[in-house]
Each structure stands twice: as C-alpha cells, then as structure tokens.
Image (spheres, grey):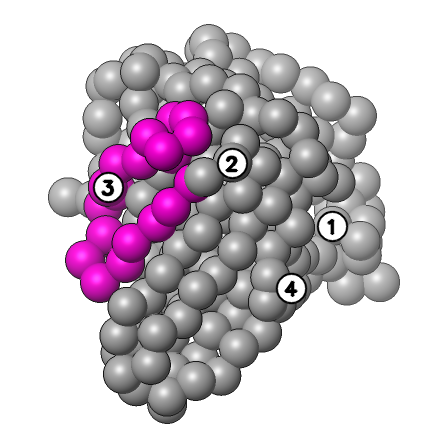
Amino acid sequence: QKEVEQDPGPLSVPEGAIVSLNCTYSNSAFQYFMWYRQYSRKGPELLMYTYSSGNKEDGRFTAQVDKSSKYISLFIRDSQPSDSATYLCAFDQTRANNLFFGTGTRLTVIP
Amino acid sequence: DAGITQSPRHKVTETGTPVTLRCHQTENHRYMYWYRQDPGHGLRLIHYSYGVKDTDKGEVSDGYSVSRSKTEDFLLTLESATSSQTSVYFCAISRGQGGQPQHFGDGTRLSIL
C-alpha cells in the first residue's frame, strides 16, 4: 500500500463550480498537511498548510483534515480558469527530512 | 516567489556525460532539497542539506551526488548520466525540518539521450 493515494484525474469542471480534491494516507506519523498548486512548467506553490484536524479557510480555498480517517481534502469555491493546474497533496512528520507527495490531480476549469 | 533560482532550466545531454544542476537561494534558509518529478511517481527526494557541507541521502539517491559549499548554493551532480535520469528536477528550501513548509524553484527539465 502506498503511503499517499491521490486520484490523478483529470478533472474538468465549468467555471463557478465547487471543486473537491482528495488524498488518503496510511502513515499515522504524518502531522502536517499541505496542498501545493503546480502550473504547467512551473514549480509547486504552497497553497494551504495545516497541522490539525478540521477546516482551514483561505479565500476561495478550504483545506479539510480528518486524521481519524486519514483523509484530507481541498475545496475550491467559485472555480476560475486561473485555477487550472495540478494540485498536489503533501504530508510531513516531526523531525522528517522530506515531504511525502501524492501524484497530483490535474484540474481544468472551463470558461 | 520564494527567491529560488535553478539553472539551467533546460538541458539535453548524452548518456555517460556528467551533468551538474545548480540551485541558488536568497532566503538564507538552512535546509535545501533536490527532488525529481516523474509521471506516476510524484515528487521524490534525491538528497538534502541541513547546512554548509552537511548533506544526506533521500529516497532515490543512487547515481546522484550533491555539494553545498555556501548557504545559498546547492549543487546536484549526475556523475555519468543515464536515460533513467531523464526527469524534471526541483530544488526546495525550508527554514527547518519536520513541519516547516518547503518552497520550490521552477525546475530543470533534463533529457538524457
């Protein structure tokens, strides 16, 4: 079993839709949860960062963590064409030397 | 952007040749990392550094070496490039480990023919 599972998509939605992106993980030592956005030919850009169960909101983006189910989600409200990118979930643990990444979900928002 | 510059941005070379990729940061962060990104695998750690001259191996370190002689520069070397090392290479930096978010450069696209 992989430590991190992420549906690769691709996912296409109309502009204005609510998008839900998800990852599951198996390592109970993961304590920090991140979402990165990666545009084509660019590096991953940190979008959301949280270290506890529950929700964290930043503008149109909401990150949700359920440690008991080992499941994290990213919700995008009122999606825009500029949200078209690959979204990577990432996990970290105390005194770890690297992040553990999902393979990414490719999202296209159609005008 | 996080003040990370990777060079070159693109490189095509032949099997068996040595290749060096450079990562330069202006943030004075202690930790620097090299990842490779391949379809179906996500980002995987090659090597990382926790200070000048202090480096350690990551998940996929075979065939790669690194050096860090200054805080701002972290070099990745492929001593004898192979076609399996064709990939996109990303440098990342962070203030610390375990819970400190990492920030990435825009990558080097390396093709080995």
Q: Which residue is mark 1?
A: A83
- When the figure is inspected, residue B59 is found, relative to residue A61, above or below; the finding is below
Q: Which residue is mark 4?
A: A40
**What distance separates the C-alpha of mark 4 from that of mark 2?**
31 Å
Front position in the image: B107 or A78: B107
Task: Give the main secondary structure of the magenta stretch.
Answer: strand
**Mark 4 residue type:** Ser
Highlighted magenta segment, given as a residue range: B49-68
Question: Do the dots labelled 3 and 1 sit on one chain?
Answer: no
In the rendered image, which quarter is residue B8 located in?
bottom right
Name which residue lies at 33% across and 14% down: A94
Position of A8 with respect to A38 (left or right) is left
Reading the chain from its start, which is encountered first: label 3 or label 2? 3
Is residue A111 shown in magenta?
A: no
- When the figure is inspected, residue B60 is found, relative to residue B8, above or below; the finding is above
Q: Which residue is mark 2?
A: B70
**Mark 1 residue type:** Asp
State which quarter of the image contains the C terminus of chain B: bottom left
State which quarter of the image contains the N terminus of chain B: top right
Please provide percent x and percent y for residue B46: 31, 49
Please provide percent x and percent y for residue B14: 37, 88
Position of B87 with respect to B26 (left or right) is left
Q: Chain of mark 1?
A: A
In the rendered image, which quarter is residue A32 located in?
top left
Q: Nearer the viewer, mark 1 or mark 4?
A: 4
Name which residue lies at 84% across and 62% down: A111
Front position in the image: B29 or A86: B29
**Mark 2 residue type:** Lys
Question: Do the dots labelled 3 and 2 sit on one chain?
Answer: yes
Q: Which residue is mark 3?
A: B57
Please provide percent x and percent y for residue B20: 44, 64
